[in-house]
Image: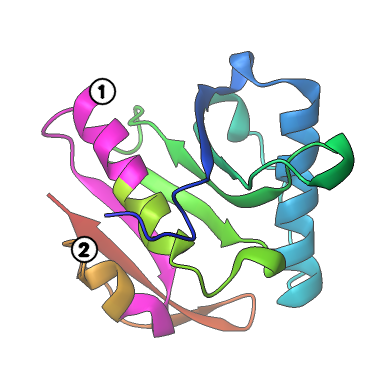
Amino acid sequence: MQSKETSSIEWRWKAFGDLTNVEVYDMLAARAAVFVIEQNCLYGDVDGLDIGAWHLFAYGSQQPSGTRAKLAGYLRVLLPDNEDADIRIGRVLTTADFRGQGLGSAMLETVLGHIRAQWPRTPIRLHAQAHLQPFYGAFGFEPISDVHEEDGIPHIWMRSA
């Protein structure tokens, strides 16, 4: 259920080939701002997986004076392949201006609806920051690994059937 703050979000669910140049720019800029700058993780974000992924964008409402809407949240979904039978949710983020409004929950509800509609009965996995285990647990994800460090941040693998 969306909160008042997230009811004005514009959702865009697209395969990579359908993304506009602006959406690709927004995606990469937000991932760099959150993961590289804020979380101080130096890693290869452009990993070749975006091309085969589906992407969920959450854009805030139009800004005053006709400027374009700001990216509020983002995540990507990797489809099953020869090496992995699960769908994988990753790169989940909320941009700084939109935190504390329930957007993370709205994004998870939205993406799980898309996944279940497009790929029913396919297990879903994610690599969560360990402190977010209760958040993802509320959506049916259960731990399937021990807590371990990645880029200096404790993480845990979680899965939902």
Instruction: Please indicate whether residue 4 sits to the left or right of residue 33 in the image.
Output: left
- The quadrant holding residue 141 is bottom left
In the rendered image, residue 81, in percent from the top left (x then y), is placed at 36, 28
- The foreground one among 50 and 72 is 72
Disc on res. 141: 2
In the rendered image, residue 114, in percent from the top left (x then y), is placed at 30, 32
The answer to whether one can see residue 134 in this image is yes
At horizontal 18% and vertical 54% (from top left) the residue drawn is 160
Label 2 neighbour load within 10 Å: few <14, some 14-19, many 20+: some
Q: Amino acid at mark 2?
A: Phe
Q: Amino acid at mark 1?
A: Gln
Earlier-in-chain disc, 1 versus 2: 1
At horizontal 75% and vertical 75% (from top left) the residue drawn is 38
Which residue lies under the disc numbered 1? 118
| Region in magenta | 110-133
Q: Is residue 132 above or below residue 121?
A: below
Q: What's the distance in space between the residues labelled 1 and 2, CA to CA?
A: 19 Å
At horizontal 42% and vertical 59% (from top left) the residue drawn is 4
